[in-house]
Image: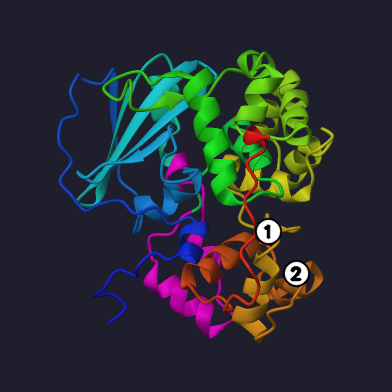
Amino acid sequence: MAGRFAPRPTRTTVRGGHAVVPAGVPRPAGPAPGRVRTWAPDGPLDLGLVLGPLRRGPADPTFSATPDGSVWRACRTPEGPGTLRVSAYGGGVRGEAWGAGAGWLLERLPELLGAADDPDAFAPRHRLVAAARHRRPGLRLTRTGLVLESLIPSVLEQKVTTGEAYRAWRLLVRTYGEPAPGPMAGRMWVMPAPRTWALIPSWEWHRAGVDDKRASTILRAVRVAARLEEAVGMEPADAQARLEVVPGIGPWTSAETVQRSHGAPDAVTVGDLHLPGIVGWALAGDRHADDAVMLSLLEPYAGQRHRAARLILLSGRVPARRAPRMPRTDIGRL
């Protein structure tokens, strides 16, 4: 039965990196792309699962899933802005790209879709995890090769509701970014360059609902953007250590970043408000688990703890809510 019906997305599975990609037949997307590349994965590939962690909310101006089954990304690459369209058909994948960064995006298309990941290295130790893996055979860990594009939205998500963080990201990218090259211009935006982030006035951060602490962390990060981007060539643990040198970036933020930039299978998120309770409930029936308990429960998955946590989130098994939802505060109205 698990193979006949696609699991319905829930709040928990969405957090696990599940983006709904409509099933459709890829069609031409207006102007011819600057470059095209095809690639054949060596196993099942689910675009929604692989690229889902890169979407920051349903209205993310840098990410779009269109009715024809394509996933679009607008990126700021080392070679300039670029737009990438990824479509799966048969057993292959087609990548089309526009803009100055088109060549860079297509060169790294396989890594973006999990070619550097090794799903077979993961061995389930719990029935729930094994069932989640069976239902999601197309899960691979993406590797973007871009640090700042994952770091800045992760900083925006520190200690606020996801809705507040998504709104801040959307407003700042739409206001200070630039239209994506190609046919999605006006509908998608490329995030601002480091210097542009540094020049955003303090009142605009306030209007976007970003407090001084998070804004200051981003400003410190973009001042050393080149050094942070160099961390792509480092091992995930070393990259996290470099990121955490910047005041305001701790283990939670660095893990959320390298999970995407490096495809780090063991970078489990610690310091999260909900994840320990979800993992504790799923694996041991302990809804009050803390980070120490979560890490103990994930110890059998050493080397693959991030993948195990994602599969637990994608299973949808979550304890019933017993407390009021975290209040949303819009400091932009103060």
Read off the residue under disc 2: 295
Toward which corner of the image does residue 318 lie, by quadrant? bottom right
Residue at screen point 70% across, 22% down: 222
Q: Earlier in the sequence, mark 1 or mark 2?
A: 1
Q: Is residue 69 above or below residue 28?
A: below
Residue 149 placement, left or right of 94: right
- Circles 1 and 2: CB distance less than 8 Å? yes
Can see residue 294?
A: yes
Helix, strand or loop at disc 2? Answer: helix
Q: Quadrant of the N terminus?
A: bottom left
Residue at screen point 50% across, 43% down: 56
* Residue 125 image point, x, y percent: 59, 80
Work out whether residue 304 or residue 77 is closer to the camera in this orientation and state it.
77
Outermost residue, front side: 334
Q: Which amino acid type is shown beneath numbered disc 2? A: Leu
For the record, the magenta segment spans 111-140
Q: Which amino acid type is shown beneath numbered disc 1? A: Val
Toward which corner of the image does residue 9 lie, by quadrant? bottom left
Read off the residue under disc 1: 268
